[in-house]
Amino acid sequence: MRSPILDYLDTLISETDHISSGEPADYIPELAAADPDKVAVALCTVNGTVYASGDADHQFSIQSMSKPFAYALAIEDQGLERVRDLIGVEPSGEAFNELSLDPETGKPRNPMINAGAIATHALIASDGQSRVERVLEFFGSLSGRTIEIDEAVASSELATGDRNLGLAYLLHSSGQLAGDPQESVTGYIRQCAASMTVSDLALMAATLANGGVQPRTGERLLCRESTRHLLSVMASCGMYDAAGDWLTGVGIPAKSGVAGGIIGVLPGQVGVAVFSPRLDGHGNSVRGVEMMQRLSEDLGLHLMEASRPARSALRETRIVSLEGRPATIYVLQGDLVLSSIEALVHELIESPPTTDVVVFDMARVDEVLPVARRTSSEMAAKLLDGGHRIVIVDPESMVEDFTDSRGRGIERWSPERLESALA
C-alpha cells in the first residue's frame, strides 16, 4: 500500500501547478539560470520517516536556509552568551541584505539576515578544520549523508558578493566580527552553496522538531536550550520583512533561501521543506509559500493551535477471534494529530493486517483533528480496496460521519457490542 500522506503531497503539487508568478533570483547568475518549473515538497516526522513528492531528487543550493543551522553550530561552539554579545535576536523589518546595524550596539539585528549570518560564520570554531568544513560536516550529521558545495553557485555568488563584503567591513569596523572580513564572507557564501534535496532539508528540520536529536540516528546534535532558542529566532526573524505575515498565516518557525527553498518546523511533530525557484519581492518562493500555507491549514501545523502531545495514536495491536472470525484490533489513544496518525499509517503500511476483519477501537481517543480524519479516510479506502472489512468503535462519536474517501460507510460498533463479540 502507498501512504495517503504521499497521496496528499502529490495533490499539493498538482493543486499549486497554476502558480507561475515571480522570477528566480536574478542577481546571482547561476540562480537566474535555474529551471523555474522545478517543484518539490517533503515532510519528515520526528520518527525519521520522510515523505517526498515532485522533483524530490533535485539538488539545489540551500542559500539562507543554512543560516539557522550555522547559528546553532556557533552557539554549540561558543555558548549562547558569547553569540548574543555579537548578534541580536530582534526582527529587523528589513530586506535580507540590508546594509544596516543596530544604531546603539553596532550589532546585526539577528542571525537570519546576511549581516548576522556573516557574523555567525565567523564564530564557528575552526580548530583543525576550516569553518566551511565544520559546517558541511554538521550538515552531514543533520541530513544523514555527505553534503557537498555546488562550486558553480559558489563562484557565481563570490563574483557578485560586494554587498556582503561591505556588510562584513561594517561589522569589522564596529567590533562585531570575530574573523577576517574577506575570509568570513567567502566562508559564508560557500556555506550557502551547500547542495541538498527537500528530503535532506526536511530531515534537518525534523531534527529541530525533535529537540536537537537526529531522528534516524538518535544522535543528539544540539542541546535542547540551543534548539529552543533557534526556533524562537526562526519564528520571529526567519522570513525577513515578511515574518509577521508568515507567523500569523502559516504559524511555524521557518527559513527561506533565494534558490527557492523554504524549511519549516512544528516542534515535537514534523519538519517540512518545499522548493520552487520563482521568488516574490521578499526573496521567498511564491509557490513555496502557498504550499506551506496549505500544509499549515490542511495538517493543523499552526503553533498557536492548542498544544497537543506528539505520541503515537497506536496503544496496542492484537489478533482476536471476533464472532468466530479472526480479526485485528488496533487500540488507539490520545489526540489524533498529524504525528500520531502518521505513526498509525506507517504501521499499517509496513505491517498490513493479516485478517479480513480490522477493528479500530477509539474508546481512549480524546480528540480527532481534521488532518487525522482525512488521512484516516484515505487509509480506510486502501484497506477496503484490499478486501478488508472495517469496524470502528467510537463511543464519543468523534467521527460520527466517518466514511472512506469514496463515500463507503464503515461499520460502527459500540464498546458493548465489541465486548460481546469477543466473548
Image (cartoon, rainbow, N blue to C red):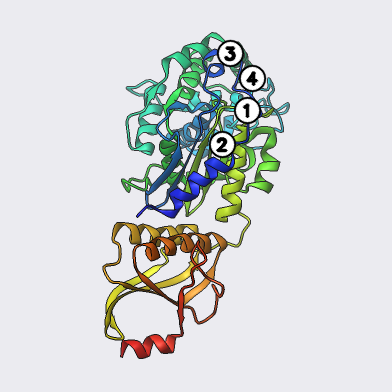
Q: Which residue is mark 1?
A: 279
Q: Which residue is mark 3?
A: 165
| Circle nearer the viewer, 4 or 3 | 3
Callouts 4 and 3 close, C-beta under 8 Å: no
Which one is earlier in the sequence, the residue at label 4 or at label 3?
3
Quadrant in which the C terminus is drawn: bottom left
Which one is earlier in the sequence, the residue at label 4 or at label 1?
4
Quadrant in which the N terminus is drawn: bottom left
Whether 228 is drawn above or below 148: the answer is below
Query: Circle 2 sits in a helix, a strand or a loop, which is it?
Result: strand
Q: Residue at x 59, y 22 (%)?
A: 24
User: Total of numbered circles in the picture?
Assistant: 4
Q: Which residue is mark 2?
A: 255
> Callout 2: few (<14), some (14-19), or many (20+) C-alpha neighbours within 10 Å?
many
Q: Residue at x 71, y 29 (%)?
A: 94
- Nearer to the camera, 271 or 81: 271
Name the amino acid type tagged 2. Lys
Name the amino acid type tagged 1. Leu
